[in-house]
Image (cartoon, helix red, strand yellow):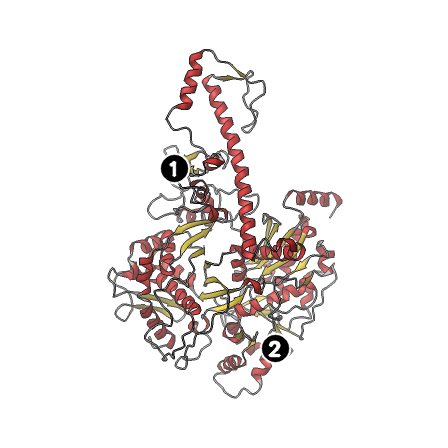
């Protein structure tokens, strides 16, 4: 890099963010993403490397290699490391590595066979690419992927598919996050306890922090066709499995300092700290920073529900002697798990509940029965709970790898009215999560229970253990009917996160623009964790100010939102004053000599402006206009004076040219009781088109509104052919504190609806047990 380009990059770097920056990384199926934030959690820059576009030599499709003989999914490990090299090179061009103080990330816990234990990590010379370090480290260039691709508790399934094909020179197994941290530090680093607890499934003993030898024996027995002659194979496999760091350590503390290779090649500071990498769903949870009464639900493949816990709940005694053993049965690997909080043991734990094939089942039902998500949401809204109006004869729909099962007075091939399928399917998926969460949170009973009790092992009518609030995220998160169904089943207030766009991109998507992609939430959560760990190491005096990781992140986000609101309010006040003066000039009250009035739209009135009053009557008419009862031209939410927060107007901007020049559309004024209650001005931020979930096409943006209330996206009601305003997603009035955190209320809880769903939980469990036992044909 020449001196001129270096100085230019340095100048660009000084314009964005503060002096101390923090890097969050994410290894997804389709690419590697990076998010850099500063001390105030402002997003400095985002970068991405997509495997298919920038690394086509590996021949992947969707980031994976598909074997046409066995239909197995594999991924080349070298591609992941080469993508990291390209990503850090992009950051180097912005002169960002020298300002990065700590690094964290997220990656799926793929099992990697190594040639020695502990694996010998030898970084190449700084002039050579980073992927050369894998030549003597791994014994197999590819590693299998779990199905579903983002299934959290997937290590048992990966181990079952990997063991038969392990090379003879394999000495140990490690995970992809552990390998990445080891490359950053230049020496082997053990996986974190939260990573193995989140992905190890039933094979991981959370109390002893080690692998269960009996579970490994059963896994090997199934893999060898049911043979019981295993010898010492389970003990040898247990020695090969990755070990974790000591459970008493605080995982947010630094794993090590960055290796000299990265200092020389990319320009990192030698004092840059590296912290443990987490699974993607745990990093996504960190980006939301929920309170102690708030859960987080990620609607995808699979659906993942995460709730904060203060301690590890006692295990529920579940008899499984009648259950056929199969490692591929969804029922066996979808029990709830407890994960230590990545910020440290003092932060408590995270309860994780998984429902595989969630988005995949909804996509298939949408494509078969409704064709659009708008119609899918409309059917969820109009069909009564359970598919019928009465208290009995409820319909159930299960969708999984074993097939599709529908129940109405017993198993049936198809419902009489197929319009009930979207709601029945979504109800069964949410009841699946609710039952497992309640089973995890319910205290253990001292009385013995039969093998298959007629009652469930928890109080179905008690909503207290369930989270009072829930943040949902995903493709279907912005549909109000689906959000209300989730609220009814969990008795929770539903919020959605406002999408965070990359720096420099407009917050309002225009009709002629493709929607801007949302930032990676997992990479953002990793950046938050890196910043938190750095602050706790460098600024111990601030520890007393924030009790937990969530308290600190929420306080910083609120402070950042308030500063943005203040700056925007000042700009809107300036525009209002300019517009008012322009109106006075038009009336002849104010006159300015010269032919030009403004040099540009934001300029100030000239100091030579002369106020000439021709007659006293003009002054009187002007004062009467100011005191008239007719409504004045609408102001935006930022133009309201600070003392008028109790009575403000919400506003929707029409994206004609730009957010600054857009015309405001006045909405109904809302009277509130004070600054501590919900305010319309802040709620308008979350109800603007920027709060719509970003999808892959402009047509899909239109489908995110309430069904039947808007024309197609490309149609305009005006005869002039001008583009129509972007319709908003209907939401409820949101409290100021929630809007400052980027949340928007979408559904409120209803105790009557919750009780109605609680009444059908026993029947749901009975049918689910029949499916798990394989008695339904």
Residue that numbered label 2 is attached to: 240
Residue placed most toward the observer, 675 or 664: 675
Which residue does the image show at 64% across and 77% down from the upper left? 171
Above or below for 442 versus 591: below
Above or below for 412 versus 4: below
Which residue does the image show at 29% across and 54% down from the upper left? 382
Above or below for 535 versus 511: below
Left or right: residue 95 compared with residue 454: right
Name the secondary structure under disc 1. Answer: loop
Q: Is residue 66 visible?
A: no
Q: Residues within 10 Å of mark 1 (few under 14, many from 20)?
A: few
Left or right: residue 215 compared with residue 532: left
Name the secondary structure under disc 2. Answer: helix
Q: Position of residue 502 (x, y in %)?
A: 55, 47
Residue placed most toward the observer, 670 or 394: 670
Picture quadrant of residue 596: top right
Q: Position of residue 626 (x, y in %)?
A: 42, 23
Residue that numbered label 1 is attached to: 669
Q: Position of residue 467 (x, y in %)?
A: 43, 60
Q: Residues within 10 Å of mark 2 (few under 14, many from 20)?
A: some
Picture quadrant of residue 113: bottom right
Q: Is residue 20 visible?
A: yes
The label nearer to you, 1 versus 2, is: 1
Q: Earlier in the sequence, mark 1 or mark 2?
A: 2
Q: CA distance from mark 1 to mark 2?
A: 66 Å
Residue extending furthest toward the top: 615
Residue placed most toward the observer, 401 or 314: 314
Residue extending furthest toward the left: 390
């Amino acid at each position: 890099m020449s001196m001129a380009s270096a100085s230019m990059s340095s100048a660009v770097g000084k314009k964005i963010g503060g002096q101390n920056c923090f890097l969050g990384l994410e290894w997804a199926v389709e690419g590697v993403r990076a998010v850099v934030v500063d001390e105030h959690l402002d997003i400095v820059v985002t970068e991405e490397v997509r495997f298919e576009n920038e690394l086509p030599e590996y021949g992947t499709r969707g980031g994976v290699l598909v074997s046409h003989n066995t239909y197995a999914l594999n991924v080349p490990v070298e591609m992941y490391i080469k993508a990291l090299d390209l990503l850090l090179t992009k950051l180097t061009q912005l002169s960002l590595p020298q300002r990065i103080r700590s690094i964290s990330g997220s990656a799926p816990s793929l099992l990697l066979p190594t040639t020695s234990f502990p694996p010998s990590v030898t970084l190449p010379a700084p002039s050579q690419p980073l992927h050369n370090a894998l030549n003597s480290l791994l014994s197999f260039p590819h590693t299998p992927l779990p199905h579903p691709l983002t299934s959290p508790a997937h290590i048992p399934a990966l181990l079952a598919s990997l063991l038969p094909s392990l090379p003879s020179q394999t000495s140990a197994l490690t995970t992809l996050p552990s390998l990445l941290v080891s490359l950053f530090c230049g020496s082997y680093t053990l996986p974190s306890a939260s990573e193995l607890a989140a992905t190890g499934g039933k094979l991981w003993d959370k109390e002893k922090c080690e692998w269960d030898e009996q579970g490994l024996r059963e896994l090997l027995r199934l893999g060898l066709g049911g043979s019981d002659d295993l010898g010492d194979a389970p003990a040898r496999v247990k020695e090969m499995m990755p070990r974790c760091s000591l459970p008493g350590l605080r995982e947010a503390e630094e794993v090590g300092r960055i290796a000299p290779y990265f200092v020389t090649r990319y320009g990192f500071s030698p004092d840059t700290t590296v912290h443990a990498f987490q699974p993607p769903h745990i990093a996504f949870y960190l980006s939301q920073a929920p309170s102690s009464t708030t859960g987080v639900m990620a609607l995808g493949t699979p659906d993942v529900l995460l709730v904060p816990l203060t301690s590890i709940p006692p295990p529920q005694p579940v008899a499984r002697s009648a259950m056929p053993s199969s490692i591929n049965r969804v029922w066996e690997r979808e029990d709830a798990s407890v994960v230590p909080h990545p910020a440290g043991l003092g932060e408590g734990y995270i309860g994780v509940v998984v429902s595989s094939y969630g988005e995949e089942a909804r996509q298939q039902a949408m494509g078969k029965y409704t064709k659009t998500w708008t119609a899918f949401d409309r059917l969820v809204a109009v069909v009564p709970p359970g598919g019928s109006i009465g208290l009995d004869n409820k319909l159930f729909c299960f969708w999984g790898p074993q097939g599709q099962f529908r129940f109405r007075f017993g198993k049936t091939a198809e419902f009489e009215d197929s319009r009930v399928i979207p709601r029945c399917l979504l109800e069964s998926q949410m009841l699946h999560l609710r039952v497992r969460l309640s089973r995890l949170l319910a205290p253990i009973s001292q009385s013995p229970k039969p093998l298959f009790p007629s009652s469930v092992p928890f109080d179905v009518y008690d909503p207290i253990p369930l989270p009072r609030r829930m943040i949902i995220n995903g493709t279907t998160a912005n549909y109000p009917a689906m959000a209300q169904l989730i609220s009814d089943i969990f008795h929770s207030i539903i919020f959605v996160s406002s999408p965070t766009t990359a720096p420099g991109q407009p917050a309002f998507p225009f009709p002629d623009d493709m929607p801007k992609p949302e930032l990676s939430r997992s990479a953002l959560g990793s950046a938050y964790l890196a910043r938190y760990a750095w602050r706790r190491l460098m600024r111990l005096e601030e520890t007393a100010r924030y009790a937990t990781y969530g308290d600190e992140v929420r306080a910083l986000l609120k402070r950042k939102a308030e500063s943005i609101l203040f700056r925007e309010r000042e700009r809107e006040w300036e525009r209002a004053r300019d517009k008012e003066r322009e109106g006075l000039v038009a009336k002849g009250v104010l006159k300015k000599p010269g032919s030009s009035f403004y040099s540009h739209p934001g300029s100030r009135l000239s100091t030579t402006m002369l106020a000439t009053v021709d007659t006293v009557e003009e002054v009187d008419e002007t004062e009467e206009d100011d005191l008239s009862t007719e409504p004045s031209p609408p102001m935006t939410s930022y133009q309201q004076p600070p003392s008028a927060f109790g009575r403000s107007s919400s506003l929707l901007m029409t994206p004609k040219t730009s957010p600054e020049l857009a015309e405001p559309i006045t909405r109904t004024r809302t009277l509130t009781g004070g600054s501590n209650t919900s305010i319309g001005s802040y709620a308008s931020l979350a109800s603007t088109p920027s709060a719509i979930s970003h999808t892959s096409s402009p047509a899909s943006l239109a489908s995110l509104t309430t069904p039947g209330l808007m024309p197609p996206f490309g149609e305009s009601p005006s005869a002039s052919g001008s583009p129509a305003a972007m319709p908003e997603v209907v939401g409820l009035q949101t409290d100021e504190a929630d809007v400052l955190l980027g949340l928007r209320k979408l559904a409120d809880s209803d105790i009557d609806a919750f009780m109605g769903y609680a009444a059908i939980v026993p029947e749901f469990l009975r049918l689910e047990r029949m499916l798990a036992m394989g008695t339904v044909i």
